[in-house]
Amino acid sequence: MNVKKIRNDFPILERKINGNPLIYFDNAATSQKPLAVIEAISDYYKKHNANVHRGIHTLSDESTQLYEGARKTIAEFIGAGSPNELIFTKGTTDSLNSLAISLCKEINTDDEIITTIAEHHSNFLPWQKLAEKRGAALKILRTIDNEKLFINELEKTLTEKTKIVTLTQASNVLGTISPIMRIAEKVRQYNPNIKIVIDGAQSLPHIPVNVRKLNIDFFAFSAHKMMGPMGIGGLWIKKEHLEELEPFAFGGGMINEVTIEKSSWAEVPHKFEAGTPDVAGAIGWAKAIKYIEKIGGMKTLQKHCRELTKYAIENLQKIDGLKILGSADAEKRTGLVSFTVNGVHAHDIAGLLDSKGVAIRAGHHCAAPLHEELGINASARVSFQIYNTKEEIDYFVETLKEGLKILR
């Protein structure tokens, strides 16, 4: 794999920040986009722009084919059994909120929803609010980095009242990859009717995912963290739930028939896609997947990011007072490293690095309960993508070392 050649595909990497070459280590928040994705979106608006499914004219037909073709590409990428199992949304947050709305009627007083302390707010708040609304209990698994202890805690927490188990496949703070297949196995053994919801926002950009093999019910994910455009994401729904699940939004495009007395819904997946969709976003997302496949696929991307993660951890561990959050084993995590430095706030670290052209993330990363559990108010996070290099990590580490002499 030629990283230098790959970097040429990303125009934004030519920028200078405060007079320094941009080093972009904020990929867990959003990744940069290759020129192929940018051009695919531009080409759509230049040549094909029209609303889908409704128009009986050439542009509408072309847009529909491109849109549904994108659905097929993305569905195949995640291992869906059919393109109809993939619902387009605005992103992971929208997917999880929409799902919570649709599942609302299935939750009654004293029912239980299980989640973990490590969740992004997007996979915590919708279930917290659903539990409050329906008088249900939200039960929090607190074991974080020990797989055996986590499974034991899960088994002890499951009861006959459990209706939903929802968790992230990869933590956006710790980088920890959850053993979803083992978790699903334990849940299914206890009660096969419990619905399993997975937040795949951080996992899909870094590890190969096959939703059917995971043995889950729902999988939420976004385009913008995997080199696709912002503002579009997906919700994979297991085939058996597609008909029974209620729509979460209503309007044009999702209806079969509307009368004064009653209405009926269109066939899936359109039943769940009210209004004008983000056609250009879907096309750009599909192009991002094709780009990933062109450079060697997810295994190549995963290998590269793991090597960078291992290299970053080895070098960061040499800095006095720096603590890495999560496992130090790069094989057990995605391409991100969060850390704290004794006596120095994460925001100060991020500001200093930005002055030297290095973009990182600082704060609680929309995972405030986890930071509280860890006894910290913020952490700094670097996260990698296919276009990052060890040379960039060297510059980042040396800049951090020099900066800490000022900040301490």
Image (tube, grey):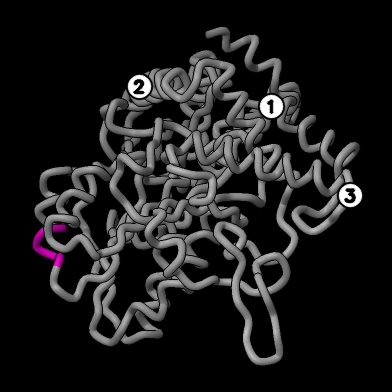
What amino acid is found at the position of numbered circle 3 in the picture?
His
Residue 34: image tag: 1
Q: Quadrant of residue 135?
A: bottom left
| 326 left or right, relative to 257 | left
Q: Spatial distance from mark 1 to mark 2, Cα to Cα?
A: 25 Å
Q: Quadrant of residue 274?
A: bottom right
What amino acid is found at the position of numbered circle 1 in the picture?
Pro
Q: Quadrant of residue 328?
A: top left
Residue at the disc numbered 3: 57
- Does the magenta run of residues contain 283? no
Q: Earlier in the sequence, mark 2 or mark 3?
A: 3
Element carrying mark 1: loop
Which residue is located at x 46 percent, y 48 percent?
Answer: 345
> Which of the image's four quarters has the C terminus?
top left
Residue 211 appears at what percent x and percent y?
A: 38, 43
Q: Can the viewer see residue 339 in this picture?
A: no
